[in-house]
Image (cartoon, helix red, strand yellow):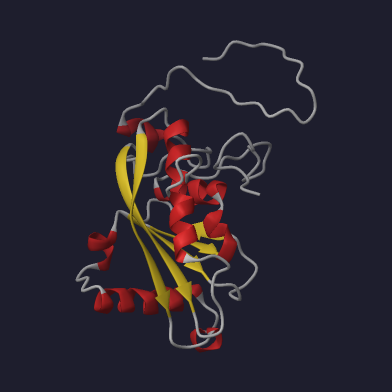
Amino acid sequence: TFSSATFSIPTGTLVLIRFSSLTIFPDSYYNSIPRGQTRRLVDYTNAHGTKCYAMVRISTADSEPSFSAAYLRNRMTSPVSSMAMQFRECSLGQTDWTLTNVYDIALPNDLVFYDKNPARMRGAVVDLIQSDYQVRNFRSDIADHVLFCMPPGTGQWIANAATGHWRSQYNDRWCLSLSALVHELGHNQGLNHAGESGGAYGDWTSYMGSVV
C-alpha cells in the first residue's frame, strides 16, 4: 500500500526509489492472477535464492562479437556494477547470481552456412561444448541458465528469452547491457512484460518494461 505524495523534481534528475519491505506471496497467488496482467509469474515461482549462469560468446569464421570473452567476464563480475548486483537490489537481497563460466566458442563456418540463424548457431555451439568440455548433459551440467552472445550479422534484434525457460540470447553488444540481461533473465524467472496504458513495454520504472 502506497500513500500519495507530491514532489517537485528538476528535469534530468536521476531518482532512486528504495522500498523498506517486500511482500512475498505464496506460489498459488501467482498462478491465480488473470491472464494479461503485467509483471506476473507464470507457472514458475522459483525466482528467489542463488542461481548459477554461464555465458557463451559465439563467433563464426566471418563475424565475432565486438567484445572479448575476458571483457565479458569482467563486465559480469564487476564489483561496482554487475547483473547480479542489479538483481540483488531489485529483490532486496532475495535473488543472487553466480557466474560459472564464460565459454568462447568459434564456429568453423561463416554466417551464411548457419543461415544467419541464431538457433542453428546455438545448436552447433552446444555440440562443441559437449565434445570439447566433456559435458554429458548440456542443460543440467552447465548452469541453471545459459546466456548466448551472438555475433553481429544475424538481424536487427536486441535480445529474447522464453518465459520460465533456461536460455536467453543477445545480439552482439546487447550481451553487455545490464538492463537487457535483467529483462531477459526476468523472463526466464517467469516474469512477463511490464505494460502500462495499453503498451506491452509501457512501464519504464521496471526492468520488465523497455530496455532501451
Q: Taking 147 as reference, is 81 left or right?
A: right
Q: Is any atom of residue 162 visible in this view? A: no
What count of labels does the image hold?
0
Q: Which residue appears at 36% of the width and 26% of the height?
A: 25
Q: Which residue appears at 41% of the width and 40% of the height?
A: 41
Q: Is any atom of residue 36 visible in this view? A: yes
Q: Position of residue 207 (x, y in %)?
A: 55, 41
Front residue of 79 and 51:
79
Q: Which residue appears at 55% of the width and 80% of the height?
A: 116
Q: Position of residue 69 (x, y in %)?
A: 45, 65
Vertical arrangement, residue 141 with respect to residue 180, above or below: below
Vertical arrangement, residue 178 with respect to residue 118, above or below: above
Vertical arrangement, residue 144 with respect to residue 201, above or below: below
Q: Position of residue 131 (x, y in %)?
A: 25, 79
Residue 204 in which image quadrant: top right
Q: Position of residue 9 (x, y in %)?
A: 75, 20
Q: Taking 117 as reference, is 131 left or right?
A: left
Front residue of 38 and 131:
131
Q: Which residue appears at 53% of the width and 48% of the height?
A: 178
Front residue of 151 and 75:
75
Q: Taking 169 as reference, is 124 left or right?
A: left
